[in-house]
Amino acid sequence: AKKEDEGLFHNPVFIGPLSFVFTLILSALLSLALLRLGFIKSGWMMMALILSTTSLGVVLPVLKEKKLNNTSFGQTILLTALLADFITMFLISIYATYYEKNSLSIEMMLVFILFIAFAFLHRTGLILGRIPWINKLIDELSHATAQIKLRASLALMVGFIVLAGVLNSEMILGAFIAGIIVSLLTTDQDRRVEKDLEAFGFSFFIPIFFVLVGVGFNLKELVKSPEAMLLVPVLLAVALIVKFLPTLIFKFAFSWKEAFAAGSLLSARLSLIIAASLIAYRLDIIEEATNSAIILVAVITVTLSPLLFSFLMRDETEQEDIEEVGNLALKKLLKALDNFNVDYTTKELKAMFTHFDKDGRGTIDIDEFVAVLEGEHSSEDLEPL
């Protein structure tokens, strides 16, 4: 439960970014420690970025399933995950370009063209959205066969991927920016486009990606290397530490249970950490055995983290369900009274509910109230009413 606002540290919008900054710093320190202890031979900065990642594609569905995505707690987790995905992708792209050139160059700055294109297309989309005849044309072309909005979204994704390739940046950054544009330009009426993209991605693109990851996963190399096998539990421990410790600041605005639950869910890693690891392996920053160890850690975290989050938040979810059921029941009761044209004055309502105030403190006896509604009392029992 959210606490009363008592300053900056009780503001979820401040807590989310601060938590990610702590994650980044902690990842850098522990990655440097891994290098000094001999667990990795090079690339501690890249390892820090890899460990800082979070899987927004796992976080959002889990929060939606638990009906927490629109709560203050859920929004704080989403903001932290979004920053982790976006900033780490951007820094990985910059670092990869720097590593390939082995020096600072003007080409590194070309990645900012992606953000210029992002700002231009976002602004253009907002302007075009205010023109009535364009809105009408888009609505006419949004039927089942044309699907102009879905096609435009896919074209935007391909365009940014190509632009990222031309700028020698990472394609995942281009795809991510395209996704942000689609998210910003869609309205509540366009949620079908998001669902279509989710279905397309989860049923086509992501399976292909993981098939290729599976093909590239060298289990033999991992098993053959004692160092790599030892690296798996070490990396798993570090991956959990860099998420759990920073999320302790969630305690300023939420409960201890929610703070630990946030740490568990943000520990889930999937596509981004694997993509970042493949980039590092392709650039010879890490060895093949290390890449395989990272993939295995990703599989473990993405399996266990949502389960731990669900276990920690089970009571909160039950409470949300009770409130939802209660609201529906109240609407049904009010609708029934309205259908029978039953009207009560304020005085009559107060007098009626006095019957259920057993302790005289203005607290309704829920069991007594339910018993009356279910007809468990005789007419003589209800004479005081």
Image (cartoon, rainbow, N blue to C red):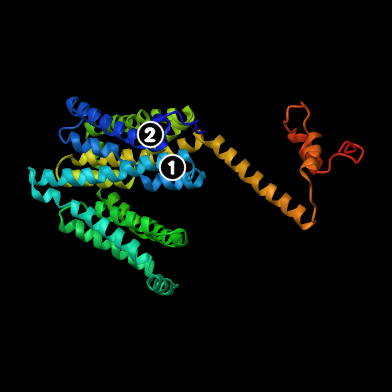
What residue appears at the point 30 percent right and 59 percent down from the top-left corner?
A: 123
Image position of 110 with respect to 35: above or below: below
Q: Is residue 194 left or right of residue 361?
A: left
Mark 1 or mark 2: which comes first in sequence?
2
What residue appears at the point 26 percent right and 62 percent down from the top-left corner?
A: 158
Q: Position of residue 133 (x, y in %)?
A: 39, 74
Q: Amino acid at mark 1?
A: Gln
Image position of 19 with respect to 126: above or below: above
What residue appears at the point 21 percent right and 26 percent down from the top-left corner?
A: 33
Q: Secondary structure at mark 1?
A: helix
Residue 230 visible, this orientation? no
Q: Is residue 167 left or right of residue 245?
A: left
Q: Amino acid at mark 2?
A: Ile
Q: Secondary structure at mark 2?
A: helix
Crowd tier of the residue under label 1, counting other residues whose Cα lies within 10 Å: few below 14, some 14–19, many 20 or above? some
Q: Hey, which quadrant is residue 165 in on the image?
A: bottom left
Q: Hey, which quadrant is residue 92 in on the image?
A: top left
Residue at which label 2 appears: 15
Q: Position of residue 267 (x, y in %)?
A: 37, 37
Residue 141 visible, this orientation? yes
Q: Nearer the viewer, residue 146 or 231?
A: 146
| Rendered-image quadrant of the C terminus | top right
Labelled disc at residue 385: none
Q: Nearer the viewer, residue 311 or 340?
A: 340
Q: Is residue 84 left or right of residue 146?
A: left
Residue at which label 1 appears: 75
